[in-house]
Image (cartoon, grey):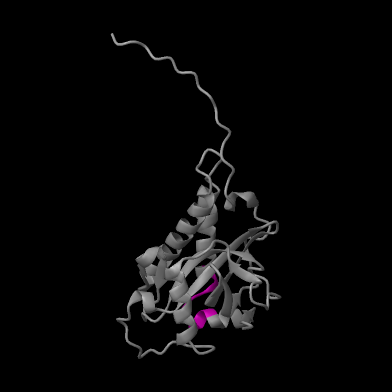
Amino acid sequence: MEPVCHVGEAAVRRLRELDLTPEDVHRPIAGGLAEARMCTEMDAPGMAGYAFWSRSNRTFRERMTPNAWTFSNAQSILRTINPSGTFAITAVSGSGMVGEEAADFVGDVRTKNPKGSAVAKLVERNFKQLPLFSVFDEGMENEVEVNDLPTWFLLYKSSSAGLMFELSLPVQMHGKYVDSWRERIILDDNPFLGAEFDIKRLDEMPPATPVDVPVKFRGAV
C-alpha cells in the first residue's frame, strides 16, 4: 500500500485536523534530544535510545495535557490521547527514510526496533478501522477501550544530517517491524537538521571495557 504523504501546507492542515500544530510535534523531539544528550559512555548500553523514547513521550504529554489530552501506558505503549477520545499518538524510533517525501514503498520507512503482539494488534486495528483521510467523528463514543484507539506514530530517526521525524499512521507489519503506512505527515520546517548530536547515541553503545580493580580482603578483627 502506497501511503498518502502530506507535505508543506498540506501537512500543517492535516495536523490541524488532528488538533495539532507544528510546534506540538517539534517539542517532544526537542525533549527527547535534550535527554539523550545527557547520556555518556558511562550509562548502560542503549540508555540514550531509551531516554529519547521516554522523554519524547513525556514532553508531548506535558505539552498536551493542559489542553485536555489524556494518556495511557497500557501494554507498555506510551499513548497520548486526543480530548475527543478517538485517537492516540505515541513517539517511536524509526529507521529508513523517515521524514523523506520520496519514501513510497513498503519498508522504506519502518520502526527501528522489532515490535511484539500488542503493537501488532494495534496496527491491525488501524488497518481495519480507518478510511483514507479520516477526520474523526465528533459524535463517536468517547469511552472506547484505549487499546482499540487508532494510534499514530511520531517517528524519529538520527541521521548524519540531524534528526528526522514524521507523524504517520501505521497499518501493516512484515515480520516484527511496522513498515506500512496509510498517511505520512512531513513538515517542511525541521529545526533539528544540522543539530550537533552524535548519531551513534541513539544506537546501542558498546559495553565499556572491563577494568580490573584489585581488592584485598582483611581478616576479621
Q: Nearer the viewer, residue 65 or 108?
A: 108
> Quick check: 25 above or below 33?
below
Residue 114 in the image, given as x and y percentages of width and height: 53, 63
- Whether residue 178 can be seen here: yes
**What residue lies at 32% left-to-right and 81% top-to-bottom?**
144
Left or right, residue 38 beside residue 78: right
Residue 17 in the image, given as x and y percentages of width and height: 49, 83
Residue 11 in the image, given as x and y percentages of width and height: 59, 79
**What residue lies at 37% left-to-right and 66% top-to-bottom?**
75
Residue pushed farthest top?
221
- The image quarter containing residue 65 is bottom left
| Range covered by the magenta-colored residues | 15-23
**What residue lies at 37% left-to-right and 72% top-to-bottom?**
69
Does the magenta portion include 17? yes
- The image quarter containing residue 33 is bottom right
**What residue lies at 55% left-to-right and 31% top-to-bottom?**
210
Left or right, residue 131 beside residue 100: left
- Whether residue 197 can be seen here: no
Q: Nearer the viewer, residue 36 or 214?
A: 214
Residue pushed farthest front?
175
Where, quadrant-wise, is the N terminus in this rendering? bottom right
Where, quadrant-wise, is the C terminus in this rendering? top left
Residue 194 in the image, given as x and y percentages of width and height: 68, 57
Does the magenta portion include 92? no
Q: Nearer the viewer, residue 52 or 219?
A: 219
How many marks the image carries: the answer is: 0
